[in-house]
Image (tube, helix red, strand yellow):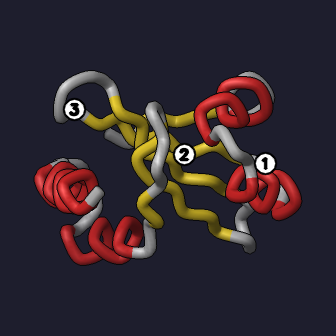
Amino acid sequence: MLEIGLLLKQEVLSYKNKESKRIKKERYNNMRIVDSNLVAGVSYDRSSKTLTVALKSGGTDLRVYRYTGVSKHTYTAFNAAESKSSFFASKIRPRHRATRLL
């Protein structure tokens, strides 16, 4: 678990785009590590209804996506789900628009 958290932060800090490193750190520091075969971490912004999800993509690679239009109810149900992978695959991925961040 700790390895995934460190890897996630390392991936984010090494990602280069138009934003400053400070903004990137703030955006991902609140990501909660998840015990799942597919999902490595999640964060939710209530004001914009966006869910940021770090997905495991084999080995030590992670892919980070932002899903828009995710209600607080959906986020709460996702956190409570016994299988985060199944919930994500059936309720979030097919129903919400995604933007790949990493």
Residue at x-position 23% and y-position 55%: 12
Residue nearest the observer in this picture, 29 or 56: 56
Where residue 6 sits in the image (x, y, percent)? 18, 61
Name which residue type carries label 2.
Answer: Arg
Where residue 60 sits in the image (x, y, percent)? 17, 34
Residue nearest the observer in this picture, 25 or 1: 1
Does label 3 or label 1 sit earlier along the sequence? 3
**Badge 1 local density, few (<14 within 10 Å), some, or many (20+)?**
some
Kind of element beneath mark 3:
loop
Q: Is 38 situated left or right of 3 in this image?
A: right
Q: Is 41 situated left or right of 22 in this image?
A: right
Compared with 5, 55 (above or below) is above
Q: CA distance from mark 3 to mark 1?
A: 26 Å
User: What residue occupies the far right of the structure in this picture?
Assistant: 73
User: What residue occupies the far front of the structure in this picture?
Assistant: 82
Residue at x-position 18% and y-position 52%: 7
Kind of element beneath mark 1:
loop
Q: Is 49 situated left or right of 26 in this image?
A: right
Kind of element beneath mark 2:
strand
**Badge 3 local density, few (<14 within 10 Å), some, or many (20+)?**
few
Snapshot quadrant of residue 55: top left
Name which residue type carries label 1.
Answer: Gly
Where residue 82 sits in the image (x, y, percent)? 70, 45
Residue that badge 3 annotates: 61
Compared with 30, 7 (above or below) is above
Does label 2 or label 3 sit earlier along the sequence? 3
- Residue 18, visible in the rendered structure: no
Residue that badge 1 annotates: 69
Residue that badge 2 annotates: 66
The N terminus - image quarter = bottom left
